[in-house]
Amino acid sequence: MSVTNASASLTDSGVDARFSLWRHSDGAVRAAGDAHLGDHALSGDVVAQARQVYELGARFVSIEPTVEIGPEPGAERMIPLLSFVRELTSYGLEVDWRARMAPGGPEWWVFSHLFPPSVLDGPRADEALTVWRARYHVGRCFLRRGPGFMQIRDRRHGGLRRMTVSDDVYISAIDSVLTGQGADFVPEPVVSVLEKQNLFIRIGNGLWCAPYRLRRWPLPSWEV
């Protein structure tokens, strides 16, 4: 992997998840008759489904059930739902979702680039959620592509970490996990490197890819 530090497709999502679409996050606006854009079930291709949500004109999405994030076998069933939150965040949408962090699982901060949950349960959850909400902005951990390389910018750690990936094996691995195809055919040494960078997060017996593709540039031009 060439890394420089300068500072999907499934047929079934595997989880019974539902979401409601709204034109606006303000409760008074949502009470209007034309603000609700319908209720839906999560499909296997969360990348395409998030794009459709945005194209429908939704700007606020409410998701059920609670996302259970832990190390125990079976927790990987929540990866599609967590990926849906990631993809919605990439469009700058507001997301009403709930998360429960199990002891021994990933730390909350690796998810802090996602739109903050409405409710967070788990160790020191109140403190974590306060910090999460205070620090959140679109673009905290994202990737973008160039000819023959992928650049990842990560602000989850407090400062800015910039990583440039130019090895095709690593680019293919990120694409595979990002689109929900899993890591079954990703070499274990590649998985290990990306886990150490907190780009791949182990949830149950599965892997989740943290950075999202930035859909629109939210930062001043000097941040490019």
Image: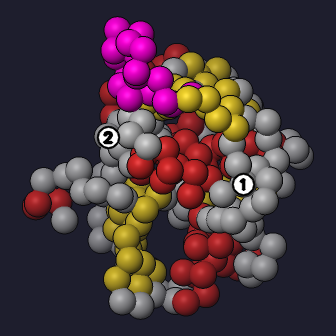
Colouring style: secondary structure
Disc nearer the start of the sequence (1/2): 1
Above-or-below relation of 83 to 40? below
Q: Are the two marked residues, 1 and 2, in contact with CB atoms closer than 8 angstroms?
A: no
How far across and down, in percent of the image, does residue 20 sit? 57, 28
- Using residue 175 as the reference point, say whether residue 207 is left or right of it: right
Mark number, residue 44: 1
Which amino acid, mark 2? His
In the image, residue 17 above or below residue 123: below
Q: From the top left corner, tell me how far across and down residue 212 is, in percent.
A: 47, 58
Q: In which quarter of the image is residue 176?
A: bottom right
Q: Dividing the image into 4 quarters, which one contains the C terminus?
A: bottom left
- 24 magenta-colored: yes
Secondary structure, mark 1, is loop
Residue on which disc 2 sits: 137
Segment colored magenta: 20-37
Foreground residue among 79 and 52: 52
Q: Nearer the viewer, mark 1 or mark 2?
A: 1
Q: What element carries label 2?
A: loop
Q: Position of residue 201 (x, y in %)?
A: 65, 55
Residue type of the residue flagged with mark 1: Gly
